[in-house]
Amino acid sequence: MTKALDKNDKDREQALEVIRHLCLAIRKNCHLIHIPLLSVNVINSLNAKLSKSEIKALNFVYAKRRDLNVLSSQVSIKMIVSYDEVSRHEIGKIYLNPSTNSHAELYEECHLLAENLHDSGFYRIVTKVIQKTMHIDTAVYQTCFFPMQGGGVTIKDVYKLECQLEHHLCLAILDSDKKWPNCKENGNTASKFEEEIAQMAIPLLCDYYIMKMVSEIENMIPIDVLSRFSSPKQKSFLKNHYQVLPWCDMKKGLEYKILYDKTAYKEWKKEFPTEVQWTAVDALIASSKDKKDYEKKVKQTQYQLAYDPWGAQILSSIMHPDRKHAGKYDLYSTDLSKLHPNQKTEWEEIGWKIFCWTCCFTRKIF
């Protein structure tokens, strides 16, 4: 702001261009823009340099300065645009120097990268619920993001490209794909993602979150909602195996291929002593040269499921209910106290992180 008003500063025109980009972000309502140095005098000084719509955007921000001050003290991440700082990403702050990062498109919404497009819709609901629990007025603030898909291991490639381009803010949310209760190791997708990202320089405009307390997004579905899409046998499963639900594969059921791992074998045998054909598993393990050989034999074997899974479309079915289920539940009214403790943790972690990265006002200024 200071450089834009300084007639002799060599960066004056570029500073004005940055302000125009920020004004466009305000007009598009894709970010919350807080300008602490803004005043009536400053806006008047810029009157001849900016368009009427840009001045209107600055007046809007000035009128909202008290609200922005309060929210700025709450959110966990802020981008500071300044010529006085070296561009870097620290915990809670992104410093962006327009001289060295002129290609950053500040007027574009944050990209929310998930493994499927409908995941973003569910995360939007989670975020709104958490926003309400944080007493952040949903009539004043909402989220704005561009949903992106990076199914399976391709999420790593999409995220790396976002990091390299440094054009947009980008937040990735990944399933952990943990295979048994209290498993310490992430699944293949999340593990490869972390391995490759760890070899890169800390990305300036990007961040990610890998679930810790559940295996997949389907494990975040409130159990009372999931029960509405359940058979009597599935409802019994939800009741009798409540403690391990965060780790159960809701789409496919317990797959025998993971039972070659001794810890997986131990944990699931403890939970499903009679539901799994353990003698058949033991025989397959004993006759296999290694894990790869075991998994090959499992593929050729018909085995009894420990529980009836809900199928790959369960989240989509809940997000877009048919006539039978329409109006029977409201995800926006989810009571966090009624969630499984692990679900509650993930709703809070993911919802708050997404809100901080994507918050904006509820309406465009014009």
Image (cartoon, grey):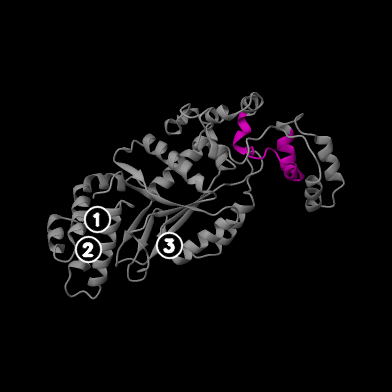
Indicate whether 350 appears above or below 17: above
Amino acid identity at mark 1: Ile
Q: Secondary structure at mark 1?
A: loop
Question: How many callouts does the rendering have?
Answer: 3
Label whose residue precedes the other's in the sequence (2 or 1): 2
Residue 198's disc number: none
Asked whether 217 falls inside the magenta stretch, the response is no
Q: Which residue is mark 1?
A: 35
State the CA–CA distance, disc 1 to disc 3.
21 Å
Q: Is residue 169 above or below residue 75?
A: below
Provide the residue span drawn in magenta.
Answer: 242-269
- Are discs 2 and 1 less than 8 Å apart at CB? yes
In the rendered structure, find residue 204 and report the number of the disc placed on it. Answer: 3
For the residue marked with disc 3, what is the amino acid? Leu
- Expressed as whole percent of the image width and height from the top left, the position of residue 118 reads 50, 45
* Cβ–Cβ under 8 Å for marks 2 and 3: no
| Quarter-of-image position of residue 14 | bottom left
Predominant SS of the magenta segment: helix
Contact check, label 1 and label 3, Cβ < 8 Å: no
Q: In the image, is 288 to the left or to the right of 268?
A: right
Residue matched to label 2: 1
Q: Within 10 Å of the Cα at label 3, are there few (<14), some (14-19), or many (20+) other Cα atoms?
A: many
